[in-house]
Image (tube, rainbow, N blue to C red):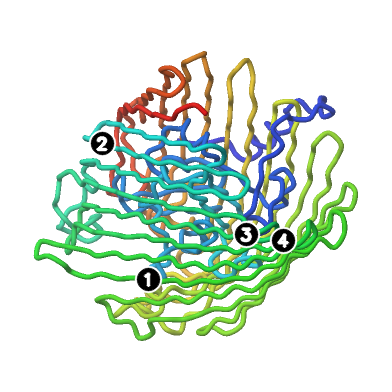
Amino acid sequence: MTFRPLTTAVALALALPLTAWANQATDLDEVLVTATRTQIALRDSLSPAQVIGRAEIERSQSTSLQQLLAGRAGINLTNTGGMGKQTSLFLRGAGSNQLLVLIDGVRIGSATAGLPALQDLPVEQIERIEIVRGPHSSLYGADAIGGVIQIFTRRDTGALQPRAMAGIGSNNLREASAGLGLGGERGWFGADFAFLRTDGINACDGTAAGWGAGCFADEPDRDGYRNRSANLRGGGKLGEAWTLEGTALRAEGYNHYDGSWANYSETVQQVFSGKLRFAPSTATAFQATVGRSYDESDDYGATGFVGGLETRRDQASVQGDFMLREGQTLTAGLDWLDDHITGSTAYDVDSRDNTGVFAEYQGRFGAQQLQAGLRGDDNEQFGSHNTGNLGWGWHFDGGLLLSARYSTGFRAPSFNDLYYPYYGNPDLQPEESKNINVGLSGEVQTWRWTLDVFENRVDDLISFDSATFLPGNIDTARLRGGELTVATTFAGWDLAAQYSHVDPRNRSNGTNRGNLLPRRARDTGRIDLDRDFGDFAFGTTLNAAGSRYDDAANLVRVGGYATLDLRLEYALGSDWTVLARVTNLFDRDYQLVDWYNQPGREYGLSVRWQPAR
């Protein structure tokens, strides 16, 4: 499948009704935290960003984080065989190990592999997701080369709100969840539990015969998956100036897959966070945060247990926010992170810590907006590393914002990169990136749109060196592209359209120079269309991606695809809702990784209970 070039996106943006700038859009109050580590209006962000709220999550009827995020601006996804299978997210062409993922402000992901296990994070536990594109190491330190995705767990306000959901679907899918929450002026509390199980599909068409044959196994069977999760949270005000809150999330995954030495895994992800905030005035606030993320994975084969690893990441930070004068804010703080691994594989080094100091300035001078930040990190293994950002914006009359942002980032090698037996290279150095982004966004009547173009150059890219059979700092990559998003309401219909183009090129000297980086589609797009008809609600999602290469030499091509999903809701009174969905309506046969299958047409039926307040 092919897409028109980015110039089509530019033309579409310029074709919007620019003559009506005097009429502001109505939905202007969306809040963003991740882009600056302070609350700002989404429309004022100089970093390209997107927010997915709980209402949109429920309306989408997504059963996985992969399904919820697919096709959104800047995002490329790969998956090795359906629900629960390893899922990698490429943001603006940067790899999953160049992406920082936070849950309630706590960094997650395996320190060994350097990847977050996105496939095991249940959507029923999520209140909102913030996606910020482009390097943000000046705020968060290592790994934020492609951007930052922050997941906020469920939180309720108002009177006690119970809820429950149960559903069934194709491939013997069973899912259920239950929870409650309440929140008032002095405190809040909540708890949610969720369960999902599916018999799955045949994940891999590989064979044990021959080199490069996918999963190197002859296992034409169903590869099922089971997930159970729990989330607890609570907080309250301690006097007028102090606030204390805490959250805990645990997700367990039980996954069957096709493999030559192991074909079943059990995983655990746990995230704990606590925050104490002191705000003596509207101009000054301090907060201290502590957290721990825990990642465990055990693999099993025909003879039983074959190996396992555990990652513990302890974290702490202090931050102060100071209003210097009206429209000018200074944020400064200190972060501390300690990674520690244990398991059946011996590493030469099994722990390291990192301390970072940062400062971020935000200023508004009439129509002009300025942002500048600096950060210094002291890593136990790699010494000091400095990053920064500089952003500028011009707010024109009628809701038009022109912005430009320059930022730098870095990624520290993972423990696998450095020390995995017979593979690691302890001489690796951190990757470094330099990025520029130019954006234009507007709001007019019910129209909201953004257009961003960017270039991100990554030096010392860590990749496999075919000469030494070890990873090395041998590559330079150039990630160039753009994104267009459009949202509006017309004749009762809610429309959201997103299109991304990225050209992720290998710029290193060697036989692969000029090739596309593997597993990234150059073009992706998504269109969501929804409408309420009294007690009925109807929606559809078109998701598409162009072709990609599965190898660095660009010899193995994985074709593009387009899928269409339908969804329907019917309100049985004020408390009960019946939901039905069809995904991949036309039963498209496609892959995201060579040899690994994706589900065909699937059906789902569920019922949701949530008493009206």
For the residue marked with disc 4, what is the amino acid? Answer: Ala
Q: Nearer the viewer, mark 1 or mark 4?
A: 4
Give the SS element for disc 2: strand
Residue 543 image point, x, y percent: 46, 34
Judge by depth and name the residue closer to the eye, 285 or 519: 285
Dot 1 or dot 4, earlier in sequence: 4
C-alpha distance separating marks 3 and 2 = 45 Å
Residue 217 image point, x, y percent: 16, 56
Dot 3 or dot 2, earlier in sequence: 2
For the residue marked with disc 3, what is the amino acid? Answer: Leu
* Residue, far left: 303
For the residue marked with disc 1, what is the amino acid? Answer: Thr
C-alpha distance separating marks 4 and 2 = 47 Å
For the residue marked with disc 2, what is the amino acid? Answer: Leu
Relative placement, left or right, of 227 versus 480 is left
Q: Residue at x 25, y 47 (%)?
A: 225
Dot 3 or dot 1, earlier in sequence: 3
Dots 1 and 4: beta carbons under 8 Å? no
As drawn, the label of residue 173 is: 2
